[in-house]
Image (spheres, rainbow, N blue to C red):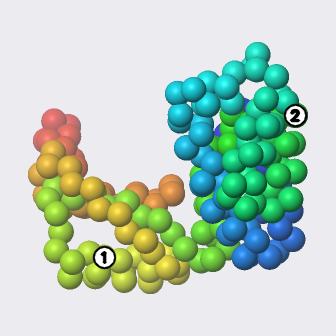
Amino acid sequence: MSANRAATRYAKALYLSAEGKLDEALADQVHIEEILPLFTSPEVGRVLKSPVVPNSIKSDVLKYALEKSGASKRLHAFIQVLIEARRINLLPEIAVVFEAILDQVQGKAHVDLEAASSLPDTELSMIQKTLEKVLGKKVTLTQQVLPDLLGGFVVRSGHLVVDMSLKTKLEQIAEQAVQ
């Protein structure tokens, strides 16, 4: 099974373990986000990701971190399942999928907006409101400046991509001229 499929299955299982209690699922998300930096730490990350490090050591490290964060027994048990199944290295991917599940349940969408230059707040607000109408969700907009777009913008949300950039328009005109 691919890592992405496994991460999706574990994220769904974690959500279902909250038995529809959104506040508990959101608390799990907070606690997972608090322990994720351990996976990028040079020393601790190496221990957690190594297949030769005994599970008992990984369990002790994460148990301590979860206790410090005040995580539920249910989340402790979930992390222990990941350790025993030798899937704890998937926790960062599980966290991403889990966040997407929670966003979907709450009617939220994260949208990346790439623009050739920084857009004024009025334009950002107008784009955000339009996207909320189109997507039917509360939109969180993240802007990134990419000068090589030349002008216009590109909007990305999940599988949806709306490319209104000058760069793409010029590429399309050049392609049509060649044909």
Which corner quadrant of the image does residue 99 belong to? bottom right
Q: Nearer the viewer, residue 66 or 100?
A: 66
Along the viewing direction, whichever of 62 and 51 lies nearer the viewer: 62
Distance, label 1 to label 2, CA atoms, is 46 Å
Q: Amino acid at mark 2?
A: Glu
Residue under the point 60% across and 54% down: 34
**Of callouts 1 and 2, the N-terminal one:** 2
Say whether marks 1 and 2 touch (CB < 8 Å): no
Q: Is residue 33 visible?
A: yes
Q: Which element is circle 1 on?
A: helix
Asked if residue 141 is positioned above or below residue 177 in the image, the reply reads below
Residue under the point 57% across and 26% down: 43
Snapshot quadrant of residue 88: top right
Q: Residue at x 75, y 60 (%)?
A: 71
In this view of the protein, can residue 173 be seen by the observer? Answer: no
x, y (%) of residue 1? 78, 32
Q: Which residue is mark 2?
A: 84
Q: Position of residue 42 (x, y in %)?
A: 52, 27
Q: From the viewer's perspective, tell me whether residue 54 is left or right of residue 136.
A: right
> Is residue 15 or residue 172 the one in the foreground?
15
Q: Is residue 148 left or right of residue 126?
A: left
For the C terminus, which image quadrant?
top left
> Which disc, if any, is residue 127?
1
Disc 2 element: helix
Q: Position of residue 82 (x, y in %)?
A: 81, 40
Q: Position of residue 21 (x, y in %)?
A: 80, 76
Using a 10 Å C-alpha cutoff, classify the residue at mark 1 as few (fewer than 14 neighbours), some (14 to 19) or many (20 or more). Answer: some
| Amino acid on which the number 1 mark rests in the picture | Ile
Identify the residue at image location x=79%, y=29%: 57
> Position of 109 compared to 166: left or right?
right
